[in-house]
Amino acid sequence: MAKIRMKNAVVEMDGDEMARVLWALVKERLLLPFVDLKTEYYDLCIANRDRTGDGVTVESANAIVRAGVGVKCATITSNAARMAEYGLAALTASPNATIRAILDGTVFRKPIAVARVKPTVRSWKWPIVIARHAYGDVYKNAEMLVPGAGKLELVWTSLDGAERRVLVADMKAAGIAQGMHNLDESIRSFARCCFRMARDEGLPLWFAAKDTISKIYDGRFKDIFQEVFEGEFAGSGVAYHYSLIDDAVARIVKCEGGLVWACKNYDGDVMSDMVASASGSLAMMTSVLVSPSGAYEYEAAHGTVQRHYYRWLKGEKTSTNPVALIFAWTGALIKRAELDGVPRLFDFAKRLEAKTLATIESGWMTADLAAIAEPAPARALDSEEFIAKIAQGM
Ligand code: NAP
Ligand code: MG
């Protein structure tokens, strides 16, 4: 069979550690034998981000805006420990935060369900799609170590020099401070993305914040969601429900699932890991960033799987689950196929997804799933064995 031809390229962002090892393996065994893969490649490994003063990250994000579709491997977010480990010249921002700030938009995360793996939360019958606002808040904050007693203020200066200030605290001693922001237009497009997703999937939409405490900041989110709902989606059939974030969390673990849960940036970061892990495994979660400009970035919800990588470096075969990385690729290829009108590419990506799930259903899986599958398989496969099983008969 001739390899499937692509019309336009997908922007490919390579990453770090175990995720990078699996990335190469997935391409080599599951994509390249079947597809004449067209990608615009950016190496976002930590050494290259450091070498380019993080320029490569910004370039890759701009490339997604241009090309319309990107796929990203998990990357290390640098911190003091990583700086020492990799001998970095400087700390760089989280690549995901940088990319999200450029694309704006909303991150949708949806568990990849398999019948053999029952969610930890017994009441969940259907997947919970988490919609994470991808702009601003603590991910674009400014922070300060406050050296001692003094007045801490929030100051806004307009373009013509007018000022507005509020007192944050009259600090009696040294401490810490943080300033963050968001934009009405970003919140509005986030709300629109969520209502559209809920309408298209035929699911109710929940949104939650803490407007009782944060009357202006979280209150603004609540008001904008209500405006968008009443102004644009009131007659669309979407059931919309606002509650306080703590109330929403309490209800989520008692509900049957089958809803879109819109979360502010930080809530989405934390809650998507909770939903992923309670749905089975962090490696069974898809993630796509949908930008209001119409660009899509697909990735796995998990990180670089550092602990497995250290074992792999010692020569051990690890049983790291590649499913979320495979689905990042299929998501990107399906979107590319739809935009470019390439049905063979579309069919291939769908077949690869189905084959991956069927492989697990027939008892071949990695250790994270083997530990929770019912019935349990005779043994867990290592990553290479699992990928080879998927490739068999593709
Ligand atoms: P992680 O890479 O998601 O891994 C946390 C743990 O979850 C692993 O140790 C493993 O548990 C389990 N796990 C995650 N993915 C798995 C997979 N595919 N197969 C099997 N088990 C899996 O998070 P982390 O260790 O906290 O972070 C490592 C690095 O990733 C950090 O440098 C962080 O900055 C980065 N990170 C990047 C992204 C991103 O680029 N999107 C997201 C999150 C974190 P066991 O060890 O118990 O098997
Ligand atoms: Mg997270």
Image: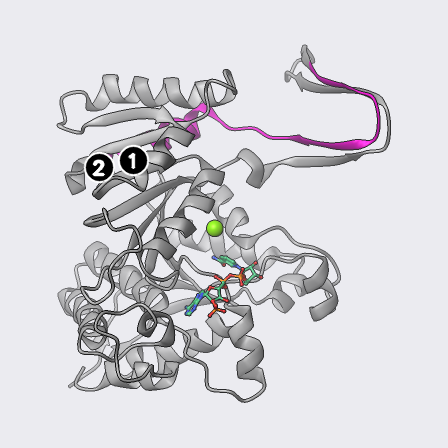
Three-letter residue code for mark 2: Ala
In this image, 118 relative to 132: left or right?
A: left
The residue pinned by badge 2 equals 198
Query: Residue 93: horizontal and vertical position, in percent?
Result: 62, 50
Instruction: Name the quadrant containing residue 39.
Output: bottom left
User: Could you tell me which quadrant the N terminus lies in?
Assistant: bottom left
Identity of the residue drawn at 74% across and 66% down: 84
In this image, 32 relative to 209: left or right?
A: left
Sort mark 1 into few (<14), some (14-19) or many (20+) by Cα contacts within 10 Å.
many
- Frontmost residue, 301 versus 136: 301
Residue 169 among magenta residues = yes
Query: Residue 153: horizontal and vertical position, in percent?
Result: 73, 19
Confirm if mark 1 falls within 8 A of ligand 2. no
Identity of the residue drawn at 27% across and 65% down: 330
Q: Tell me the distance, in whole angstroms, between the alpha carbons under discs 1 and 2.
A: 6 Å
Question: Residue 316, relative to residue 20: is it above or below?
Answer: below
Question: Residue 306, relative to residue 188: is it above or below?
Answer: below
The residue pinned by badge 1 equals 194
Magenta extent: 167-196
Determine contact: label 1, label 2, CB under 8 Å: yes
Residue 235 among magenta residues = no
Sort mark 2 into few (<14), some (14-19) or many (20+) by Cα contacts within 10 Å.
many
